[in-house]
Amino acid sequence: MTDKKVIITIAPTGGLGTKQMNPDLPTQPAEIAEDVIRCCEAGASVVAVHARDKDDLASCDAGIYRDINDRIRAGCDIVINNSTGGGPTGEMVGPLASGDLEMLWEQRIKGVDGGPEICTHDAFVANTYYEGKTIMMNASLPRSRDLAQMMKDRGIKPEWECMSIGHMLDPIQLIREGLDEPPYIFNFVLGVEKGIQGAMPWSLKTLVAMRDLLPEGSIFTVSGIGPAQLPGAMGALLCGGHVRVGLEDNMYYARGKLATNLMLVERLVRQVRDMGMEPATPAEARQMLGIPRPATAAA
Amino acid sequence: MAKGKVIITIAPTGGMGTKAMNPDLPTQPEEIANDVAACAAAGASVVAVHARRPDDGATCNPEIYRDINTRIRAKCDIIINNSTGGGVSGDMVRDLGGGDLEIMWEQRIKGVEAGAEICTHDAHTIVANFNGGNVYVMTPYNRSRELAVMMKERGIKPEWECFNLGHMIDPIRLIEEGLDEPPYNFNFVLGAHKGFQGALPFTPKVLTQLVDELPKGSVFTVSGIGPAQVPAAMGALLCGGHVRVGLEDNMYYSRGQLATNLQLVERLVRQVHDMNMEVATPDEAREMLGVPRAAG
């Protein structure tokens, strides 16, 4: 038994899901803020925000991000992460010269301009599969370096997202180059193998292998996708990590039963306490993640 | 997500604990039976019984085992496992001098004579540290084979207890000799390193290594000792295994708060349900463990 504090990240929206899949998915700024404030009261200390345009299509528009961030900050103290992945729809997607599709880099990097404390950094190249289309996530090392520099210039903490062990290599290189400082924040996304080429299925052994490769001074979160959310969360606790839940990653509470973000946070808080641990407050999470408190709500 | 259901084993008593450590530790037959019946109603499907003499000293006396087993069977349908390890006091120990003790083989093997459906089989030699002295548990291979034969002759399913990877070797040899049939029941006891030399602490990596060494057709349970009980239980669920809890292994519900057997089972049932898994009934557990219903 331990007195360890666990950082619960709520990922309420994501870039893929629709209200047709789950009517409780929050997509517009006021909906997202309302849902996040409830989840924060229940024990979440970080929010992983994705923005959507007025038609619910994916966006990294800094104005929309700022609107969402401001509304969240007006209601709670949660740590805000803005995605630089965006999603596979809307203005995020454009053609490559080959005719294949790409999640446009110039759109993705706009995600750093909405005033978040953390931004996701997907420093890898992978094909994603969405509605019969193949869409490339194309972050070469020079692009990843540019984005890391942009974050550093803005005082934003990168969250290195890794869907497989190989996705840890470019982050480790950029850390060696001095583009991030301890604690390094890694997010292990496990169980997304149906949607992203080369992504690893959830298993405890995979998680242990990834944890063992972390640079010294790292802190990690596990995001289990779909049915991997529950075991991924408990695996994180066993390996000394933190947990992300939310409708971005998993629409269901149990087989055939749709979830809400609040239900997923409430169950996780109960599980954390049954493991003899406690959810971290936003202030504790900032300290553990090495994030200074934002200067103002409009920072 | 593990397929199938989770078998919860309650280990209510053990061979080391005392009422001075935890007043809710059941030691006498009627106390044990009452506690086990409550745990069975809460979701436990196997009980790992240790017997105690009227003075609470450890014993494998078949008359006492049979008394306990009969009382339990009168109250519930739980699967009964009788220990052939016994304990570190009472009838079990021979004084080796210098403060050292040996747990006597001729006493241990009496545990198979009381009509249990499962008996523990500790097919390893290990030294425990108890009250400042050494307690030797001497089980060379020839003894383990003798005990496996006794179980086979009586229709008792062996539960192979392993405190580390090396403890799986002799059970695997005995399995290869035909002294057990699938499903093989392994119990990984993790976190006992302060009391048993060479026992492994619980870590996710240790558990996955043990699981990887299991012979095909095995079923496994994890018994986490002390503070390892909660994480080891969850590790078992994540690796497709089953879980043992109880005061034998862990006296506390949380830091500084003593547990009861029922509290430990109730929390585990809640955790199993929160993982979207289901708890096995005794009949489901019998099928999964390959244990025929005892004649009684």
Image: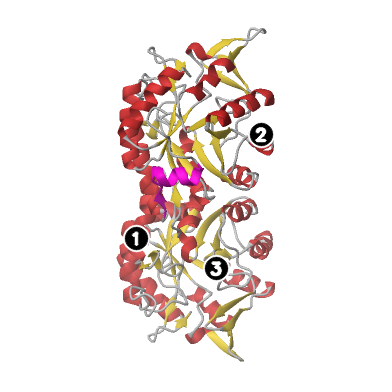
In the rendered structure, which amino acid carries the disc numbered 2? Leu
Q: Position of residue B230 (x, y in %)?
A: 45, 57
Q: Look at the image and tell me whether residue B1 can be seen.
A: no
- Residue beneath the point at 30% across and 69% down: B34
Instruction: Classify A268 as above or below A252.
Output: below
Q: Say which quarter of the image contains residue A104.
A: top right
Instruction: Report which residue position mark 3 lands on.
Output: B192
Question: What chain does badge 1 belong to?
Answer: B
Question: What chain does badge 3 belong to?
Answer: B
Instruction: Classify A181 as above or below B261.
Output: above
Question: What chain does badge 2 belong to?
Answer: A
Q: Position of residue B168 (x, y in %)?
A: 64, 62
Question: Is residue A288 in the magenta section?
Answer: yes
- Check whether the beta carbons of the residues at disc 2 and disc 3 lie within 8 A of each other: no
- Residue beneath the point at 53% across and 33% down: A155
Q: Which residues are magenta?
A: A277-290
Instruction: Report which residue position mark 1 lands on.
Output: B40
Label 3: how many Cα within 10 Å (few below 14, some 14–19, many 20+): many
Instruction: Report which residue position mark 2 lands on.
Output: A174
- Cα distance between the residues tagged 2 and 1: 55 Å
Question: Is residue B141 in the magenta section?
Answer: no
- The reply to whether label 1 and label 3 mark residues of one chain is yes
Position of residue B25 in the picture relative to residue A241 (left or right): left
B199 or B289, which lies in front?
B199
- Residue beneath the point at 53% across and 24% down: A84
In the rendered structure, which amino acid carries the disc numbered 3? Ala
- Residue beneath the point at 35% across and 22% down: A29
